[in-house]
Amino acid sequence: MSNIDTDDLIFKALADSRRRQILDLLKSAPRTTGELCDHFKDALDRCTVMQHMKVLERAGLIVVRREGRNRWNYLNAAPFKEIHDRWISPYAHEAVELLARLKHDLEGT
């Protein structure tokens, strides 16, 4: 799969607020599929949660490990780092430089 295809999968996965909620839940610790489904029990049925998780897994944003009857879901931070390096980091560097110049100009040093 090319980088363009992978990027498309990642950004499409992140486009849905419920999938971002799942990722937020996984930031603090890995969770079982049952725990994730329980979190959404008032809003989504188990099948829908599983579909969202499949999209996240296909995009490489989560890693699934089976242990006995449990299915553990882990956040995969690597794609976020790649997005940061490609799309955010270059602009962040320019913003820091701009703020440094502004500080310099305001202080007259």
Image: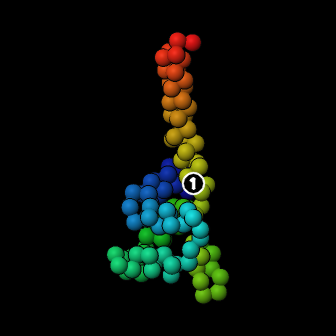
Residue furthest to the right: 67
| Residue 58 rendering spot, x and y as whole percentages | 52, 65
| Residue 72 rendering spot, x and y as whole percentages | 59, 76
Residue furthest to the top: 108
Picture colour scheme: rainbow
Q: Quadrant of the N terminus?
A: bottom right
Q: Which residue is mark 1?
A: 79
| Residue type pointed to by label 1 | Pro
Q: Secondary structure at mark 1?
A: helix
Residue at the spot 51% in from the left edge and 26% down from the top edge? 99
Q: Quadrant of the C terminus?
A: top right
**How many residues crowd around disc 1 within 10 Å: few (fewer than 14), some, or many (20 or more)?**
some
| Residue 39 rendering spot, x and y as whole percentages | 44, 76
Residue at the spot 54% in from the left edge and 66% down from the top edge? 26
Quarter residue 12 falls in: bottom left
| Residue 20 rendering spot, x and y as whole percentages | 44, 61
Quarter residue 16 falls in: bottom left
Residue furthest to the front: 107
- Is residue 89 depicted above or below 72 in this figure? above
Quick check: can you spot residue 94?
A: no
Residue at the spot 53% in from the left edge and 35% down from the top edge? 92
In this picture, residue 30 sits left or right of residue 105: right
